[in-house]
Image: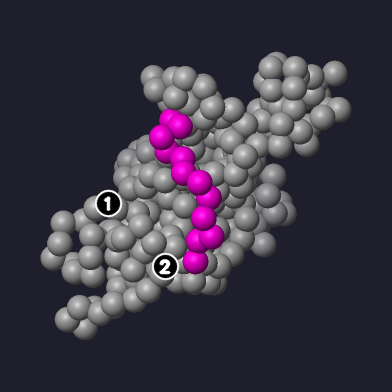
Amino acid sequence: MTEHLDRRLNAFRADLADERLSGKVSADRFAPGAPAAISVAVAQLRPYPDLKRGIDTQLLFGERVRVFDRRDGWAWVQADEDGYVGYLPETDLSPPVEVTHWVVVPRTFVYPQAELRSVPLRALSMGSRIVVIGEAETRGTRYFLLEDGGAVIAGHCLALGEKPDEDYVSIAERFIETPYLWGGRSGFGIDCSGLTQLAMMMAGHKAPRDSDMQARFGSEIGRQDLRRGDMVFWKGHVGIMQDEKTMLHANGHTMTVAREDLKAAITRIGWLYDQPTGFRRPF
């Protein structure tokens, strides 16, 4: 009875499945999933409960998930933001809370107090969700005080849902020279589709996670119609156009987020990955 469903976006196994898939897949039992939140700066989501397996994607501090199973130190979850399904260590989860703000700079620090000279407790990526319970000021620098006792630079955060920029390309440009990381989706390391998704999310748009999913997002256009904000696809890769000639992408060639002339990129990439598979306008 199991339909052909993408396992990246649908939680189902032979023994257990999301109750929303009842009638679509076969499973011993169905469950609604219990809400939880990511409690580490960056959680690595894997296709199997095995630390030796590569990651599919990452979830950020404060993002919500639904937990379908907890076993042997692992949790099987589905992300609320984009529906991605996978396994992460159970210790990466905490009970959900009502977040108030999110980080809107590529990276920031959480300090033990409202004092930038103190040793940071941890670093957070753009897109991380936090709970602000107060404010403080030290030598003219304003801080948000967090529910867990930490403090962050107030200017690095906005109320949840407020946008650092309406233009998602401008947000993506802030990640230039960020290291490339396969499966990365944070300011500490990011891949091509992670860059696209995170920048769009911060500009108020929901986008799918992987490049093959994004290749069906928006509307198809011709190469001659490319302008700022359009996307260029190869098999397994996506770039964002800064203008009609220049592309921004996280790539394994420079191992960073970098600008590249589109014509030069097509020539360079072509010998290994052939020509672009399509051009799309997301909005």
Residue 216's image quarter? top right
The magenta region covers: 89-100
Q: x, y percentage for residue 54? A: 43, 26
**Is 184 within the magenta?**
no
- Of residues 277 and 73, the one nearer the viewer is 73
Instruction: Give above or below for 20 relative to 27.
Output: below
Colour mapping:
one colour
Q: Nearer the viewer, mark 2 or mark 1?
A: 2
Q: Which mark is residue 122?
A: 1
- Of residues 162 and 111, the one nearer the viewer is 111
Name the kind of residue labelled 1 in the image.
Arg
Q: x, y percentage for residue 101? A: 46, 66
Instruction: Give above or below for 101 relative to 187.
Output: below
- Name the residue rendered at 29%, 65% in the picture: 151
Q: Which residue is mark 2?
A: 132
- Name the residue rendered at 60%, 44% in the picture: 35
Residue 55's image quarter? top left
Helix, strand or loop at mark 1: strand
Quadrant holding the N terminus: top right
Q: x, y percentage for residue 63? A: 51, 50
Q: x, y percentage for residue 135? A: 34, 76
Name the kind of residue labelled 2 in the image.
Val
Q: Earlier in the sequence, mark 2 or mark 1?
A: 1
- Name the residue rendered at 37%, 74% in the picture: 134
